[in-house]
Image (cartoon, rainbow, N blue to C red):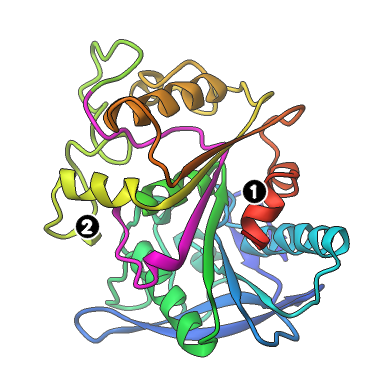
Amino acid sequence: MVDNGEAYSEVPSEFYMFETKNTTLTDKHGNNATQPYYINKNLKNVTRAVMVWPGYHRDSYNYANMIGNAYNVYKKMHNVDDGHVAIVAPYVLNQQDKSNGAVKDGWIYYEDDNFSVGGISHGPGNATISAFTAMDDMIDMMAKKYPNIEKFVVLGHSLGGQTVLRYAIVNHNPQDDKTKYWIGNPGTYTYLSKDRPISKKDCDKYDRFPSGLGSNLPSYVGSADKSDLIKKFFARDVRLAQGLDDNGVSADACDTMTQGHNRLERSAYFVKHIADVNGGSLPKSFSLEYVEGVSHQNYPMFAAKDSLPYIFRD
């Protein structure tokens, strides 16, 4: 694997406990794209699938590796037999990676980081596939391949956490009733109303998706209205996980700053916002996780004592 800081010239196809497999995605016009993904080897009687979204650097191999390490910690702690949990990390590459040689012919890829907002693929060819549709199809593929799966967990940290939050709000996941959503240390949130904790003055875009649901929703959403999206979101199993030392700014765009001055503050405000929209308390299916001594660190969040059972057991 070579990374020049902006784009990959290649990514590993096999490492540690993981190998690469491919599935075919098809858009509504019949155009196909190959979705490569990492999956752990030696699976048997799979009862859970952990679907992993990468962060800003699109390093799915790294995130697969971290979740694999966390799984090994969990197995040793609880004397769990190997092979029952599938860890699946789709390749998420962009046009710069394509130009630099990392994207093979026929592979799906995106423009910049628009995968994180359910954006449409940039290629191959004329294929127009939302990153959220790709996740829907990956989950459906796993359900058909491993019919004994009882739970899916969609997870991500930082930009990956933002991606999971957005997906949890708007998705068409065919296995939604079996799916949990673990959201770690997102730098910004998707608000469900026009209320914000900090002044919105001189920020016209504060309620545009992905910062809100007021406008600019991805085409993936279709005709669903805001109230319907919120109702379904509140019925989902959602875990908001936050490192208590994660007090960096992350982004200083005006729409982000209306949510709080740093990531920790934004987390607290968003939890209150969810409770307010829900009539004064969090939805019963929501849970909070706070990790002491952890800043904006992905693996310590995945391997935290309350994360492990949520991701791999409960």
Per the image, the residue denoted by label 1 is 5
Which residue is located at x 60 percent, y 23 percent? 248
Q: Which stretch did the figure color magenta? A: 170-194
Residue 101 locus on image (x, y percent): 57, 71
Which residue is located at x 27 percent, y 77 percent? 126
Query: Horizontal placement of 28 versus 82: left or right?
Result: left
Residue 214 locus on image (x, y percent): 18, 36
Residue kind at label 1, given as amino acid type: Gly
Quarter residue 79 falls in: bottom right
Residue 7 locus on image (x, y percent): 58, 57
Q: Can you say whether 84 is above or below 156 in the image? A: below
Which residue is located at x 51 percent, y 19 percent? 265
Residue kind at label 2, given as amino acid type: Val
Can residue 45 be seen here? yes
Residue 245 locus on image (x, y percent): 69, 23
Q: Can you say whether 256 is above or below 114 in the image? A: above
Per the image, the residue denoted by label 2 is 221
The crowding category of the residue bearing disc 2, from other C-alpha atoms within 10 Å (few below 14, some 14 to 19, many at least 20), is: some
Q: What element carries label 2?
A: helix
Q: Does the magenta stretch include residue 201?
A: no
